[in-house]
Image: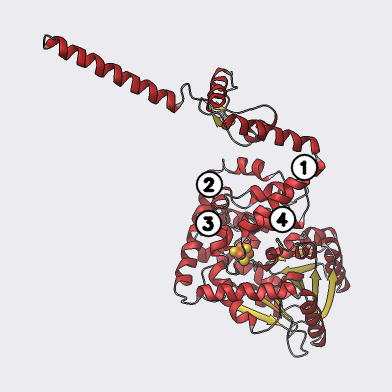
Amino acid sequence: MSEALDPKTAPTFPMAAHELLGDAQLRKNVRHATNVIQAKRKRVVEEMPDWQELRESGKQIRRHTMRHLDFYLEQFERNCTAAGGVVHWARDAEEARRIVVGLVKAQSATEVIKIKSMTTEEIQLNKALEAAGIHAYETDLAELIIQLGHDQPSHIVVPALHKNRSQIREIFMREMHLPELGEAPQDLADAARRFLREKFLRVKSAVSGANFLVAETGGVCIVESEGNGRMCLTLPETLIAVAGIDKVVPRFADLEVLLQVLPRSATGERMNPYNSIWTGVDPSDGPRAFHVVLMDNARTEILADEEARQTLHCIRCGACQNACPVYQQTGGHAYGSVYAGPIGAILTPQLQEMHHAQSLPYASSLCGACYEVCPVKINIPEVLIHLRNKVVKQETAGLRLLGNAEAMALKSVALIFRSERRFRAAQRLGRMTEWPLVRKDGQGEGWIGWLPGLLGGWTDVRDLREMPKQTFREWFEERARGTRDQRKTDIKGRRAADGH
Ligand code: SF4
């Protein structure tokens, strides 16, 4: 993971967004891709007469699971173990990394193939593997583009959504040493297939995430569109699945609901082309060793917060990202985390109590588009407001002075707004002040680019229009006065002409 996606070093959302808004190509790519996916989603959702009932069922399954998470996790462990799997428990990212590295090293392996997994991105697993002398090959096409381009994922489902075809062609030609390559999707897919096929056949260990863990059977469910996941699940000798504890579902039958809403919401498909459910080991087929790492990494703290708990209901479909007007403008990198968009704005601050993450609950207009498309009905705006409350409480507790200064500033503004006389005086004062008229991008005039003190929080990331020379009311009164005077003059003139 690059520093820009490391919550410890990433810039705050407003700072990163300000920079990314200047990248016209990136904005065009993101807007185009999200519009295409949204249109596909809309088509396949509208053909479902029971879509709202499915959403409600999804919500109930997830809510019930979270209420009894301890029970279902233990049930999963029992059933997975009985089927020949080995379950490991990891308290945090550090422990999860240590377990995976240890398991790969125990096979004396120096390479692993990987199925796209946001959980392994969350814990920066590739970096830890590299540090231990193990090279990880991403096998999902979009993840491969990101890896070869030394880039960062910007979307949960479509990590290379910010790249267009000609950019991907350049990356492939450079990194795969191809003298020629077409730009058609077929050409790019063929190049990736040739590059990956040899790895599938050679590498003996695989690392995956999990879309769902089925408690009733001990199975790990992985859905994907390219078949790379199926290759990783079946060909290697050792398979290691890393999953957050929130991925468990009680019954096999629950997949009936979740496997309908997930692909429709994620990629606008009626069904994922590849749905694999892996349960333990079988001497006649597949990996000889199967490990599941169940990772907490702050999830139990989220679980303990009743108002924020619904964050854990997420099935990582990415629909909220595509629908979000903020994400559509900034793309995913502005969120400083592998979890971008509305789900990132509520999940990252809870996973990482870092300074930068405190800006994420404000990275939303609270328009509610994310809530409307969420297939398990997570009320993201509600959680955002709850987190904003927490941020304010933390800041006022830690920085009492700043809290007081902010409270005083707001009281002064309220005082001004309550009286027309004071409001007009403030406007006059504003017009008399010599504002530093410098726009941050150096373009145009009449913009205030810097304000002192607390007001600087606004101009840190936005330019403000210069105070107008005249208020609308003054302009209107002047015009009305002028019209009145003109009318009087006209009447006088007519009377004089009539000899009165
Ligand atoms: S919050 Fe809802 S819409 Fe967003 S990724 Fe999670 S499940 Fe999908």
Q: Residues within 10 Å of mark 4 (few under 14, many from 20)?
A: many
Q: Is residue 356 above or below residue 447?
A: below
Instruction: Indicate which quadrant contains ligand 1.
Output: bottom right
Whether ligand 1 has any atom under 8 Å from the Cβ at mark 2 is answered as no
Q: Residues within 10 Å of mark 3 (few under 14, many from 20)?
A: some
On the image, numbered disc 2 is attached to which residue?
25
- Is residue 320 shown left or right of residue 351? left
On the image, numbered disc 3 is attached to which residue?
165
Color encoding of the figure: secondary structure
Residue 422 found in image quarter:
top right
Q: Position of residue 60 (x, y in %)?
A: 64, 75
Q: Residue furthest front?
A: 500
N-terminal label among 1 and 2: 2
N-terminal label among 1 and 4: 4
Which dot, 1 or 4, sits closer to the camera? 1
Q: Position of residue 21 (x, y in %)?
A: 57, 43
Which dot, 1 or 2, sits closer to the camera? 1
Kindly report the distance in space between the C-alpha atoms of the residues bearing marks 2 and 3: 12 Å
Q: Position of residue 2 (x, y in %)?
A: 73, 51
Give amino acid for label 3.
Arg
Give amino acid for label 1.
Thr
Which dot, 1 or 3, sits closer to the camera? 1
On the image, numbered disc 1 is attached to which residue?
396
N-terminal label among 1 and 3: 3
On the image, numbered disc 4 is attached to which residue?
348
Mark 4 residue element: helix
Give amino acid for label 4.
Thr
Mark 1 residue element: helix
Q: Is residue 157 visible?
A: no
Kindly report the distance in space between the C-alpha atoms of the residues bearing marks 3 and 4: 30 Å
